[in-house]
Amino acid sequence: MIVPGVTEAPRQGRAGQRPLVSIRTLSKKFSNGTLALRDVDLDLFPGEFVSLLGPSGCGKSTLLRIISDLSQPSAGTIEWPGADRADAYGKAEHSLGFVFQEPTLMPWAQTLENVTLPLRLRHMATGEANARAEAMLALVGLKGFEKAYPRELSGGMKMRVSIARALVTEPKVLLMDEPFAALDEITRHKLNDDLLAVWERNRFTAVFVTHSVFESVYLSQRIVVMAARPGRVMSELQVDAPFPRDNLFRTSAEYAHLCRLGSEALKAAIEA
């Protein structure tokens, strides 16, 4: 479904590249009978920033968990045609990071230890792991906090640590499940800016779950609007505003227009 004024993003990607991730007729039914997702079709392309926008209970988080292989679909397929290599079982290697709604840091570990965790699980040498973690902490604005414990950090700083930990393995796909929802507006805007700066520098594929039309328009190149349960893709909004984006974009007529289109698309999806 295409809402008036909302353009459908082409399946071929902006430059005709093949998808990194391809989802077809995907459905998820839980053991209690709840149908969370139904016939979801979605392509994710290399280096793009996509937001999943929809009401609570529309299956956005469930879709992320299926993409990350933390949950299995009841029907349909998810493939990685853009994967460079296969794992030991012949399956496409999933190069991804996951930022959850809560930072999920180890409370007994210092910041540097929290960020190096996925590298240590891969048996990377301590010196190399620490160097990569320190560089990533500097990139997310936490240089000087390497020895701080989670209890000594603000909510926004904890989320920065979580993002650094997800990115330290240099994933091709970064999945983010409403990471800034619990933060105040000033902190949220700052983290939006910092996230875009990291994305522009590293150009991973970003998939960002949010309830906020305003946040999705500010961050994204493409917004996928999902209907309430059972979750399904209702429309897509292309956001062609150039990067970098800043407060001038937030106060522009173009931003206001795109937010209005996003609000209309979300309203139509809720009423579907």
Image (cartoon, helix red, strand yellow):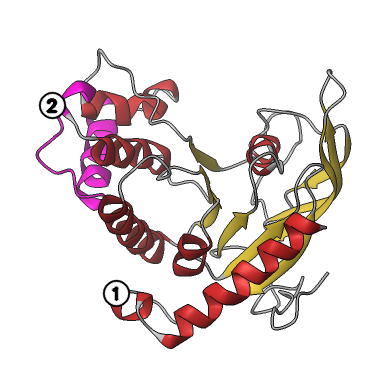
Residue 67 rendering spot, x and y as whole percentages: 68, 41
The quarter in which the N terminus is drawn is: bottom right
- Label 1 sits on a secondary structure element that is helix
Q: Who's the residue at 13% across and 35% down the image?
A: 145
Magenta part of the chain = 125-152
Tell me the chief SS of the magenta region: helix
Say which residue label 2 marks: 147
Q: Is residue 15 above or below residue 225?
A: below
Q: Who's the residue at 32% across and 62% down the image?
A: 193
Magenta span has 251? no
Q: Nearer the viewer, residue 215 or 76?
A: 215
The quarter in which the C terminus is drawn is: bottom right
**How many numbered circles are shown?**
2
- Amino acid marked by disc 1: Asn
Quarter assignment of residue 15: bottom right
Q: Residue furthest bottom?
A: 253
Residue 124 rendering spot, x and y as whole percentages: 36, 27
Q: Give the mark nearer the N terminus: 1 vs 2.
A: 2
Residue 197 rendering spot, x and y as whole percentages: 32, 63
Say which residue label 1 marks: 247
Q: Is residue 157 above or below residue 152?
A: below
Left or right for 127, reference 59: left
Left or right for 32, reference 196: right
